[in-house]
Image: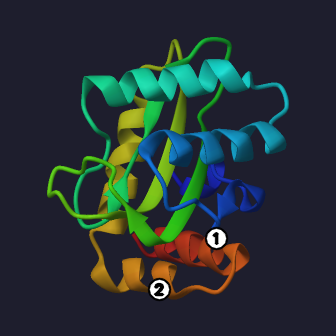
Amino acid sequence: MKISTFLGQADVTIAVPAGPKKAVLISLVDLLVSNHPELDREQLLQVLLKREELRSTGIEEGVAFPHGRVAGLDMLVACFGRCRQGVDFDSFDGKPTFFFFVLLIPEQAQGSHLKALARLNRLFQDVSFRQRILDADNADLVFSEIIEEDSRC
C-alpha cells in the first residue's frame, strides 16, 4: 500500500503547535476537516482523544501515529504534521515528538490500516529521512520527501 493512496499534498503541515497533546490533535483535525469537509470535527477529535486515553500513539524517535476508527468513512484518510520544537506526547521513549501521522480508519476496515501503520513505521525508522523532514522549509517539500521515501521502500 503506497502512502500516496491515502495522503494528499494538502494534508501535510509544518505548523503543528508546540503545546499540549490536545492542541496538537486539534490542529491536525482542523487540517483534515479543512481538506475533507465531509468529516465531522468533533467526532474526529473524540476518536483520537479516546485512542490516546487507552495508550499513547507516540512511539519513539520523535514519531507518533494518532489513529482511530471513524464511522461513515469508506477509505483510509490521513494527514501529516511536523512540530520542529517537539512536544511531550507521552511517547514510549519519553522523548519529544516532532512527527505526527494521523490515520482515520473506516469502521469496517479489515487490517488495511495495519499495513499502512507498518509501512509508515518502516519509513520513520530511517534517521536520515526523519532529519530531512525536520529540516524541510515547507509542507510541499515534506510531502515530496514522504512520497519519495515511500517509493524506495
For residue 131, the mark is none
| 6 w.r.t. 14: above or below | above
The residue at the point 64 percent across, 47 percent down is: 27
User: Could you tell me the amino acid type at mark 1?
Assistant: Phe
Q: Quadrant of the C terminus?
A: bottom left
Q: Residues within 10 Å of mark 1 (few under 14, many from 20)?
A: many
| 16 w.r.t. 36: above or below | below
Residue 53 x, y percent position in the rendering: 32, 25
Image quadrant assignment for residue 11: bottom right
Q: Distance of mark 1 from mark 2, alpha carbons?
A: 11 Å
Residue 75 x, y percent position in the rendering: 64, 29
The residue at the point 26 percent across, 47 percent down is: 90
Residue 123 x, y percent position in the rendering: 37, 66
Q: Which of 76 and 55 is in front in this view?
A: 55
Give the residue furthest to the left.
93
Q: Nearer the viewer, residue 7 or 138?
A: 138
Residue that badge 1 annotates: 143
Q: Residues within 10 Å of mark 2 (few under 14, many from 20)?
A: some
Residue 89 relative to residue 95: left or right: right
At mark 1, the secondary structure is: helix
Residue that badge 2 annotates: 132
The residue at the point 76 percent across, 36 percent down is: 33
User: Could you tell me the amino acid type at mark 2?
Assistant: Arg
